[in-house]
Image: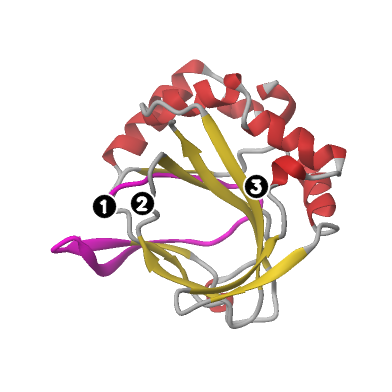
Amino acid sequence: MLKDWISSKYLANNKVNDFNRKFINAKPFSHVVLKEFFIKNKLKLVLNALMKEEFTEKNSDLYQFKQTINDIKSADNNLLYEFYLFFSSKEFLDYINKITGIKINEIDMSGFIYGQSDYLLPHDDQLEGRKIAYVVNLSEKFTRKDGGRLQFFSTKDKKPFKTTKSYSPNFGNLVLFKVSDISFHQVEEVMSRKERISFAGWFHEH
């Protein structure tokens, strides 16, 4: 199943060990960005299917964006459901476990669209059962001026202190990071009319 979705350069055993070292040693907390992780043509079909789903506006003091009304596991579209089945498969969960060293056994997944002026303020993602947060980036041609970068914070007294890493939402990238009491991150405000599109959620252990 992995070879049906993942770029072949990520399937060599020695690569997984490299990613594990990068994940463990990353600052300000454990994370890794796997660039062009997915087979591009297939992921574009998934994107097209996602854009036909129904989204709802989400607004609070912490965030502003659009989210799919239903979790992707409930999608009627066969290709979206196939992508969810791949992401939640034992084979893929084992692959993520090898990269992170963290035991997981299920996922949740939603689609997100950040339009102009949308944002997500600093938070740590901590809720019971969440072990690893992930983002599947589906946007193209985002530049620094467009905003919408995923940003990680160093901490001081276990509160967000300073932005230390910023990642543009480049198409096909998979971002993984460990959920902890120091995993403060945000999505910076989208400054242009481009749409920042993604799947995101968590790998859980229950």
Q: Is residue 64 above or below residue 86?
A: below
Could you give the CA–CA distance between mark 1 and mark 2, rounded to whole angstroms?
7 Å
Q: Secondary structure at mark 3?
A: loop
In the foreground, 108 or 39: 108
Nearer to us: label 1 or label 3: 1
Tag 3 and tag 2, C-beta contact below 8 Å: no
According to the picture, the residue beneath numbered tag 1 turns out to be: 181
Count all numbered tags in the image, as a single digit.
Answer: 3
Residue 57 shows in the view: yes
Could you give the CA–CA distance between mark 3 and mark 2, rounded to whole angstroms?
26 Å
Identity of the amino acid at label 1?
Asp
Dividing the picture into quadrants, the one containing residue 90 is: top right
According to the picture, the residue beneath numbered tag 3 turns out to be: 172
Identity of the amino acid at label 2?
Gln
Residue found at x 45% / y 74%: 62
Q: Is residue 84 above or below residue 56?
A: above
Dividing the picture into quadrants, the one containing residue 159 is: bottom left
Residue found at x 59% / y 83%: 117
According to the picture, the residue beneath numbered tag 2 turns out to be: 126
Q: Secondary structure at mark 2?
A: loop
Q: Left of 39 or right of it: where is 146?
A: left
Residue 170 drawn at (x, y percent): 61, 56
Tag 1 and tag 2, C-beta contact below 8 Å: yes
